[in-house]
Image: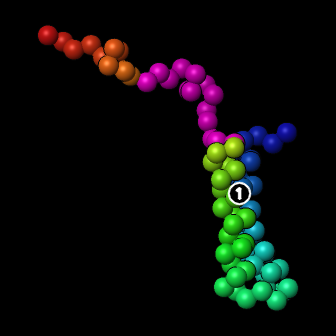
């Protein structure tokens, strides 16, 4: 299984590879660059979206112990 740090390294590497590779592939099939680049960018944005929202970067240890401060938690000194 891939650890999460390695996952984000792969995602960061795949963004420019997907953008350039799919653009070249689509241009090779006869699409104009003004069409190929936006279509390839959709794949890059999907990779970014997956990394941010489907597999978000969280630290389980600190997320479990961190508590947000509410108005009931704050004590005002008189």
Q: Which residue is drawn at 78% across and 74% down?
A: 22
Image height of 5 relative to 49, above or below: above
Q: Which of 75 and 49 is in front in this view?
A: 49
Q: Residue at x 75, y 69 (%)?
A: 17
Q: Which of 78 and 61 is in front in this view?
A: 78
Q: Is 22 within the magenta?
A: no
Which residue is the site of mark 1? Answer: 47
Q: Which of 39 and 55 is in front in this view?
A: 39
Quadrant occupied by the N terminus: top right
Q: Position of residue 26 (x, y in %)?
A: 80, 81
Quadrant in the rendering for residue 12? bottom right
Image height of 54 relative to 26, above or below: above
Quadrant occupied by the C terminus: top left
Q: How crowded is mark 1: few (under 14 residues within 10 Å), some or many (20 or more)?
A: some
Q: Where is residue 71 in the image (x, y as percent from the top left)?
A: 32, 19
Image height of 36 relative to 70, above or below: below
Q: Position of residue 7 (x, y in %)?
A: 74, 48
Q: Where is residue 44 in the image (x, y as percent from the top left)?
A: 69, 64
Does 26 sit left or right of 67 as displayed?
right
Q: Is 61 within the magenta?
A: yes
Q: Residue at x 69, y 42 (%)?
A: 55
State the residue lying farthest toward the left: 78
Quadrant in the rendering for residue 36? bottom right
What is the magenta range? 55-68
Q: Can residue 12 be seen in this view?
A: no
- Mark 1 residue element: helix
Q: Which residue is drawn at 54% across and 20% down?
A: 65
Does 61 sit left or right of 13 as displayed?
left
């Amino acid at each position: 299984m891939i650890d999460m740090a390695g996952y984000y390294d792969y995602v960061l590497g795949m963004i420019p590879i997907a953008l350039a590779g799919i653009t070249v592939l689509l241009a090779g099939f006869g699409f104009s660059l003004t069409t190929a680049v936006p279509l390839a960018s959709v794949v890059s944005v999907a990779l970014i979206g997956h990394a941010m929202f489907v597999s978000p970067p969280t630290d389980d240890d600190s997320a479990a112990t961190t508590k947000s401060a509410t108005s009931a938690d704050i004590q005002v000194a008189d």
